[in-house]
Image (cartoon, helix red, strand yellow):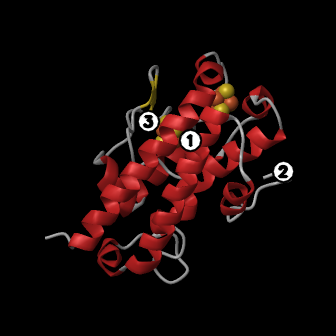
Amino acid sequence: MMNSRLNHLLEEYADLERGVQGLISAQCRETCELCTARCCRADICEEALDSPFLQTLHGHTELESDRCGFLTEYGCSLEIGRPPVCYEFFCEEILESQPDELHRDVLRILGRLPAFAGEQAHGKTHLVEIMQEDRLEKLNFQTLEKRLHQSFRMLEIIRTFYIEGTLPEDACKTLRQIPVSAGA
Ligand code: SF4
Ligand code: SF4
């Protein structure tokens, strides 16, 4: 039977991922839909099968196709459990579509939230890089709960930023926990 702390962690991480995905999609959808050179790659998709944590989240046991991995004509077929790098990468076109450097930095921070939330899950190992399934029962749950809590705070700050268009100084300070280039 799955440990209840692990179950709780899976639920919280899934909520964070859905929140991040929704905001990123709102920023990128238009550009990505017209893109003829999609950045998705089957070897990245495979990471979602190799990682026991991600595999438990999405439940798939094989790729949709050898060539395109989980990418279909409707986009990524994984609702959740995508490798964090899928949220971290923004091409030049996406970055240029942002109105200014502050928006670019906020987008980069948003994309780093799933990776940030899973750091130091077992010793120094990241949550999605744990390859032995039995280790998922022995995670640094306290550390992960704290990181998730911080990630949700940052997600809310970013959600508000997209509605109001401004970033108060204390919100900016919270977001700076995730270092990106200049600006934020
Ligand atoms: S992020 Fe850029 S390269 Fe990737 S699918 Fe979207 S527009 Fe294309
Ligand atoms: S977003 Fe989906 S299809 Fe694209 S690389 Fe990631 S897992 Fe694969």
Residue 118 horizontal/vertical position (percent): 50, 66
How crowded pointer 2 is (Cα within 10 Å; few <14, some 14-19, many 20+) is rated as few
* Image-based side of 168 in relation to 158, left or right: right
Residue shown at the point (62%, 30%) measured from the top left: 27
Foreground residue, 36 or 180? Answer: 180
Picture layout, residue 105 above or below residue 146: above
Numbered badge on residue 183: 2
What secondary structure is found at the residue carrying circle 1?
helix
Specify few, some or many for label 1: CA neighbours under 10 Å numbering under 14, 14-19, or 20 or more.
Answer: some
Report how far apart the C-alphas of labels 1 and 2 lie in the structure.
18 Å
Location of mark 1 (residue): 159
Q: Say which amino acid is labelled 2.
A: Gly
Q: What kind of element bears circle 2? A: loop
Quadrant where ligand 1 appears: top right
**Residue type, mark 1 in image:** Arg
Q: Is residue 99 left or right of residue 108?
A: right
Foreground label between 2 and 3: 2
- Residue corresponding to mark 3: 70
- Residue 119 position, x and y percent, is 54, 70
Say whether mark 3 is within 8 Å of ligand 2. yes
